[in-house]
Image: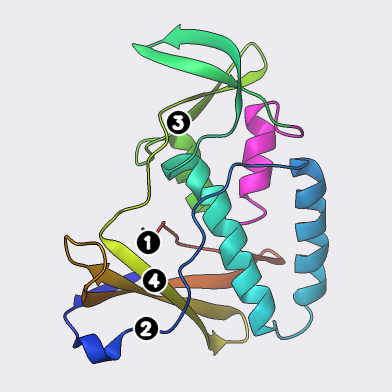
Amino acid sequence: MRGITGTLLIALLLSGCAAPPAEEASGTAASQTENMRASMVESASRPILKEEILAAYEHAVRVYSWFDMTPLPTSEETRAEGGRLYRQVNMDGIDELEDLETYLRSIFSQELADRLLEGESARIRYREFDSALYVTGELRNRDPGKGAVRLETEQYDETTYFVNVLVELLAEDGETVVGMESWSFPYALEDDRWVFTDFRLVY
């Protein structure tokens, strides 16, 4: 992951649309995982289209937000552990920690998935109690200092692409663009799976 921050003239404003805020997880995760795996197996034997890479990025943003912006939906069941209050996850297809791990590894590299599940660098943490998945941590809003986002793809070699992300930096008025921030996220073929090997939310 590469990050660069610089100040640009207002005339260089991005024309791209802002990336959508993290959405609350919906649908059946198991079905989504199956569709993603089928797509990855198919794409492993041919060059990936730009649209496929960008769709994978948007999906990764939503899933990564479960650890940084919006926790998975929960029930009223709670449990206190280690000075933290955990709420039981209520999402079809993700009932145990293993389900969440399997889902993450269809999108991110094993190393990145493990890092998220360990929770040391994540705002939102997940644990399993009595064969049920629980979460702790509160949602956060989008950074008001970040504006519109533009995405571009770049092919490095036959097994690695990059999603290059440009983000407007805004003044305190929330409108005036005072600079730009750039990130580059590798999307690579690992063990017959196309996954992001590094990632973060840019806003």
The residue tagged 4 is 148
**Element on which disc 3 rests:** strand
If you read the primary sequence from the N terminus, does the residue marked by circle 4 or circle 2 appear first?
Answer: 2
Q: Secondary structure at mark 1?
A: loop
Residue at left offset 26%, top offset 68%: 175
Question: Neighbour class for label 3 at 10 Å: few (<14), some, many (≥20)?
Answer: many
Asked if residue 22 lies left or right of residue 133, the reply is: left
Upstream in the sequence, badge 3 or badge 4? 3
Tell me which residue sits at (67%, 25%) in the image: 90
Local crowd size for mark 2, using a 10 Å CA cut-off: few (<14), some (14–19), many (≥20): some
Residue located at (19% from left, 88% from top): 9
Q: Amino acid at mark 3?
A: Arg
Q: Secondary structure at mark 2?
A: loop
Q: Measure the C-alpha gap from mark 1 to mark 4.
A: 11 Å
In the image, which is nearer the foreground, mark 3 or mark 1?
1
Three-letter code, disc 1: Val
Q: Is residue 114 visible?
A: no
* Eye-nearest disc, 2 or 1: 2
Query: Residue at label 2?
Result: 14
* Residue designated by label 1: 202
How far apart, in angstroms, are the residues tagged by discs 4 and 2?
Answer: 7 Å
Residue beneath disc 3? 125
Q: Do tag 3 and tag 1 residues touch (Cβ < 8 Å)?
A: no
Between tags 1 and 4, which lies in front? Answer: 4
